[in-house]
Image (spheres, rainbow, N blue to C red):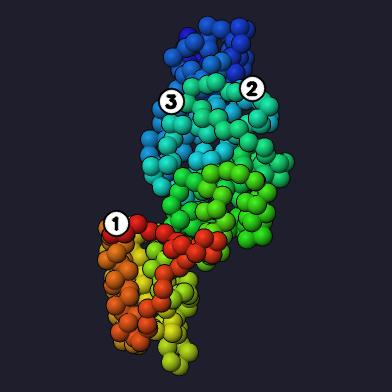
């Protein structure tokens, strides 16, 4: 069939198929190579499906819509899929675009479909939302769903971004965590609430902050304005130990541009002239947390700080393992 014939029927990218066709298409037309069978009884525009989701930042929106079509209204997109729709950070290994996660009531029929992972749980009405036409779990509920798969630094990075982007309060998050009686990651989700800070501006900054805090270093200020002794603005820092004039900065991909690097160098030179020690951390350093902690600890010690015992879990009295040993 020629393209003009298809144009006459419109250009819906996903639709359900029955014995009579679907979305205005005849049974023969829906079998045209232009459409891809994404799941039983569901067709989608093959070009859109093939073009989407090839990278971590490219989202498979068409596949999400196709997966949701045959599901009942009580089934919602959840876990890593909800996190991607909500644009909340997950490690690359967990953000698997080929698996679509849904949560269904325990009493519902199991959605047996290709590439769909079904979780069974009780969902309250206020734990579900609609975003861009997708039925998804709320940010707070999604936080509790992914907690058991994430390390503490990764979960804090997720929670920081959630609070910053959606304004989720600690009270709302705690209510969601405690309302569910038993589920994997419940204790970790509760412990991390007290570590969250919406002022963090990137996942790696959040992970770096928790790495340092877990090593027993003093609590820093997050993205503060740094002033000189006359009250004049010098710079805005990432992680600042203001009492000791030690600044820790994470340089991600954004800082790699030549112009940005020159700006950062000038800014840090100004800080050092005003008595600050600046510890620069890059992505490769994060693979060796022990070395990062040693560098920051050395800078703080030079300024008169004395080490304290590491953080401990309040319930068990055991050391709270925030980052693996280097």
SS for dot 2: loop
Q: Secondary structure at mark 1?
A: helix
Residue hosting label 3? 47
Q: Earlier in the sequence, mark 2 or mark 1?
A: 2
What residue did someone put label 1 on? 287
Where's residue 107, x and y in %?
Answer: 68, 27
What numbered label is drawn on residue 160? none
Point 39% across, 44% down: residue = 92
Labels 3 & 1 near each other (Cβ < 8 A): no
Give the crowd class for mark 2: few <14, some 14-19, many >=20 residues within 10 Å: few
Q: Nearer the viewer, residue 118 or 49?
A: 118
Find residue 284 and report its horizontal and vertical position in percent.
Answer: 27, 58
Q: Quadrant of residue 216?
A: bottom left
Q: Quadrant of the C terminus?
A: bottom left
- Residue at left 34%, top 86%? 303
Answer left or right for 140 relative to 195.
right
The residue pinned by badge 2 equals 109
Q: Residue placed at 67% from the left, 60% from the top?
A: 171
């Amino acid at each position: 069939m020629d393209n003009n014939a298809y144009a006459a029927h419109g250009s819906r990218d996903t639709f359900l198929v029955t014995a009579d066709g679907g979305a205005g298409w005849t049974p023969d037309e829906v079998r045209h190579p232009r459409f891809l069978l994404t799941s039983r009884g569901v067709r989608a525009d093959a070009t859109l499906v093939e073009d989407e989701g090839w990278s971590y930042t490219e989202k498979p929106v068409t596949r999400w819509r196709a997966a949701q079509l045959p599901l009942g209204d009580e089934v919602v997109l959840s876990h890593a899929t909800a996190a991607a729709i909500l644009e909340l950070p997950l490690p690359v290994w967990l953000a698997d675009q080929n698996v679509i996660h849904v949560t269904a009531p325990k009493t519902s029929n199991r959605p047996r479909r290709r590439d769909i992972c079904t979780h069974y749980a009780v969902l309250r009405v206020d734990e579900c939302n609609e975003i861009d036409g997708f039925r998804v779990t709320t940010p707070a509920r999604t936080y509790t769903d992914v907690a058991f798969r994430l390390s503490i630094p990764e979960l804090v990075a997720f929670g920081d971004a959630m609070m910053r982007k959606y304004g989720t309060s600690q009270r709302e998050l705690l209510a969601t965590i405690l309302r569910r009686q038993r589920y994997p990651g419940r204790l970790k989700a509760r412990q991390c609430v007290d570590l969250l800070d919406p002022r963090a501006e990137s996942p790696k900054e959040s992970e770096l902050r928790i790495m340092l805090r877990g090593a027993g270093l003093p609590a820093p200020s997050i993205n503060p304005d740094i002033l000189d002794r006359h009250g004049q603005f010098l710079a805005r820092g990432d992680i600042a130990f203001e009492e000791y004039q030690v600044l820790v900065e994470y340089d991600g991909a954004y800082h790699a541009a030549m112009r940005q690097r020159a700006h950062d160098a000038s800014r840090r030179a100004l800080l050092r002239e005003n008595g600050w020690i600046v510890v620069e951390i890059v992505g490769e350093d994060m693979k060796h947390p022990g070395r990062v902690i040693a560098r920051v600890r050395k800078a703080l010690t030079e300024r008169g700080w004395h080490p304290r015992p590491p953080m401990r879990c309040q319930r068990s009295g055991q050391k709270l393992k925030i980052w693996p040993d280097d």
